Structure formats: structure tokens, C-alpha cells
């Protein structure tokens, strides 16, 4: 699997130009036809533009000139504004293709248990996409896996300390709160997707709290509590007590209270209250969610 991931990364560079050219051609063709401003003699069907025969895609003053070994055609924009509009459309086509490649590589990374690689790839998708992430894409967690910290009692304490510091730096880079606040949350259109992202934010801040100390720890504890709190209030307002997202959030929030906030009473109360509220409604939710909710309830009983 690791070899497949490496090969995919190498192949992505090799086929990048092919994808970009394909996107340029497809983007131009689609946009020109939608505008209905073209001279048919200047255009040839895309299926006749074989990638292996492509010689050049040149940028002219107000458009593009596309040449193959046997044919060529010119595309002209009426104004600079129209050319800019075409370019934006083409850029979106290009980015969609590149994001599909990143998502595929993230899936390979997940299968290879390279969760930090998966997180880095999905963060690229999240930052570049103009749309809300699909459920399948959200399931490729944006957050890195928790890293088992070396015991301070390790006889090679200095080596352990140095390694811990290296991993802490890496984790802080991956756990970028601004990605959630600036790139992801503004694109959310459903309560479920927003709740999932806020829960993820609380989770990664909880992970940071585990490795932080002093004022830095207190800062991430406060932010983690706020993220969980906002997510849970949203879940209570928009989701039924038996909804699996709400249940999973409640358990993670309880884990924060118990492990990070040193509030075992709050943790127990939240877990018990969520369990009691959800149990009567499990049979009333959609079949697709029922199994997930039942599994969570079984784990928390």
C-alpha cells in the first residue's frame, strides 16, 4: 500500500500537465458554447484533440490558440473581462481535477495507516475547494491521528524528549485552527457538516492540550471547550438526541471534561444525560443512522 501511495504521488506529477491541458480544453469548450459567441470554423470537437497529438496551448492577447499536429483553432474573447471570466472558469476546472487526485491519494494514505499524510492532503482540498466537503470527504478526517507520547521515564529520556518536541511541532502545524475557521466553516450549508467540523476542532485542540503546558495549555483548553460547546449547542438545536453525530460529539465532549478539564462529574453527567435522552429515540431515526447510534450507545453503556 505504501508503494501504491508513492507511485501515485510520482504519477500525479507526470500526469499533471495532461490534466491541466484537458481542463483548459474542456473549460474553454463548455464556456464558449454556453456563451454562444464563437465562429464554428474556428472550433474543432474536443474528441479530435488527442492529448498525444497536442503541440501547444498559447495565450494570445484576447484568447487562446490551440494547435495539434493536424489541426488548430483559435478562441477569442470579446473583451478582457470576458477573457478573465473564462480564465476563472478554467481555473475551477483545473482545481476540481487536482482535488480529485488529492482525495484519491488521501484514500490510499488512509489504507496505508499514514493518517498524517491523509490529513495534509485533505487540508489542501479543504483550502482550495469553493464548495462544502461531501460526506465521503469529511469522513477522510481532516485531523491527524493521536500520537502516542513516549514515557518520560524512558531511560533514553533526552532522545524521547527531542522526538516528542519534533512530533509536537508537526502536530501543531497539522492542527491549524485557521483552516477550520477560515476555509471550512464559511462553506458549510448544513448543521451536520458544521457540527462535525466544530467537533473536529474541539478534538484537535484536545490533542494539543495533551502535549502542551503552562499558558499554552490553558489557551488550547479554553478554545477546545468553546468549540465543543458551540458544536453541542448546535447539535441540541438541529439534531435529535439519538442522532449519531450528536451522540459521538457528546462522548468526545465528555472525554474532554474527564481527561483535559479535570471535571469527572461534568463528564459523567454529560455522558449519562446523552445516553438517557437518546435511548428512547433510537428506533425512530433513519435506518442508515440507527446502526451507528446503537454502536455508540453500546460503547457508552
Image (cartoon, helix red, strand yellow):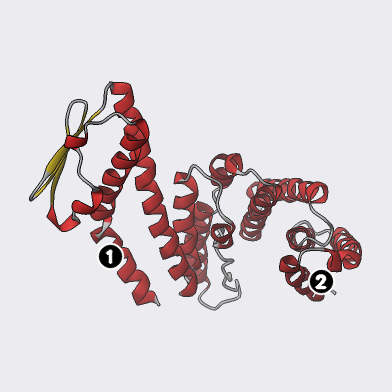
Q: Residues within 10 Å of mark 1 (few under 14, many from 20)?
A: few
Q: Quadrant of residue 182?
A: top right
Q: Which image quarter holds the N terminus?
A: bottom left
Of residues 115 and 99, the one drawn nearer to the viewer in this rendering: 99
Q: Position of residue 154 (x, y in %)?
A: 56, 77
- Residue pictured at 83% horizontal, 56% vertical: 240
Q: Secondary structure at mark 1?
A: helix
Q: Are marks 1 and 2 in contact (CB under 8 Å)?
A: no
Of residues 218 and 275, the one drawn nearer to the viewer in this rendering: 275
Q: Say whether residue 265 is left or right of residue 86.
A: right
Q: Position of residue 160 (x, y in %)?
A: 51, 70
Q: Say whether residue 15 is left or right of residue 219.
A: left
Distance of mark 1 from mark 2, alpha carbons?
44 Å
Q: Residues within 10 Å of mark 2 (few under 14, many from 20)?
A: many
Q: Earlier in the sequence, mark 1 or mark 2?
A: 1
Q: Which image quarter holds the C terminus?
A: bottom right
Of residues 168 and 34, the one drawn nearer to the viewer in this rendering: 34
Q: Give the label on residue 297, or none.
A: 2
Q: Secondary structure at mark 2?
A: helix
- Residue pictured at 18% horizontal, 55% vertical: 50
Query: Label 1 belongs to which residue?
Result: 10
Amino acid at each position: 500500500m505504501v508503494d501504491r501511495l508513492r507511485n501515485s504521488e510520482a504519477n500525479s506529477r507526470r500526469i499533471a500537465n495532461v490534466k491541466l491541458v484537458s481542463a483548459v480544453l474542456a473549460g474553454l469548450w463548455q464556456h464558449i458554447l454556453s456563451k454562444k459567441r464563437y465562429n464554428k470554423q474556428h472550433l474543432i470537437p474536443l474528441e479530435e484533440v488527442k492529448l498525444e497529438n497536442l503541440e501547444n496551448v498559447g495565450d494570445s492577447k484576447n484568447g487562446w490558440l490551440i494547435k495539434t499536429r493536424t489541426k488548430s483553432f483559435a478562441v477569442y474573447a470579446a473583451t478582457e473581462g470576458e477573457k478573465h471570466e473564462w480564465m476563472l472558469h478554467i481555473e475551477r476546472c483545473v482545481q476540481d481535477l487536482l482535488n480529485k487526485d488529492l482525495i484519491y491519494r488521501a484514500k490510499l494514505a488512509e489504507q496505508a495507516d499514514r493518517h498524517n499524510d491523509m490529513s495534509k492532503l485533505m487540508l489542501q482540498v479543504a483550502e482550495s475547494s469553493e464548495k462544502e466537503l461531501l460526506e465521503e470527504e469529511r469522513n477522510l478526517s481532516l485531523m491527524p491521528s493521536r500520537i502516542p507520547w513516549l514515557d518520560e521515564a524512558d531511560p533514553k529520556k533526552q532522545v524521547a524528549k527531542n522526538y516528542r518536541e519534533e512530533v509536537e511541532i508537526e502536530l501543531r502545524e497539522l492542527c491549524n485552527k485557521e483552516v477550520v475557521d477560515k476555509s471550512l466553516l464559511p462553506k458549510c450549508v448544513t448543521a451536520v457538516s458544521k457540527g462535525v467540523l466544530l467537533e473536529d476542532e474541539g478534538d484537535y485542540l484536545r490533542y494539543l492540550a495533551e502535549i502542551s503546558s503552562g499558558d499554552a495549555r490553558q489557551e488550547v483548553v479554553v478554545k477546545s471547550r468553546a468549540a465543543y460547546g458551540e458544536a453541542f449547542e448546535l447539535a441540541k438545536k438541529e439534531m435529535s438526541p439519538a442522532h449519531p453525530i450528536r451522540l459521538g460529539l457528546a462522548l468526545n465532549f465528555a472525554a474532554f471534561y474527564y481527561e483535559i478539564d479535570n471535571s469527572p462529574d461534568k463528564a459523567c453527567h454529560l455522558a449519562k444525560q446523552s445516553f438517557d435522552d437518546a435511548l428512547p429515540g433510537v428506533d425512530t431515526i433513519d435506518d442508515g443512522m440507527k446502526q451507528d447510534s446503537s454502536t455508540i450507545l453500546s460503547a457508552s453503556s
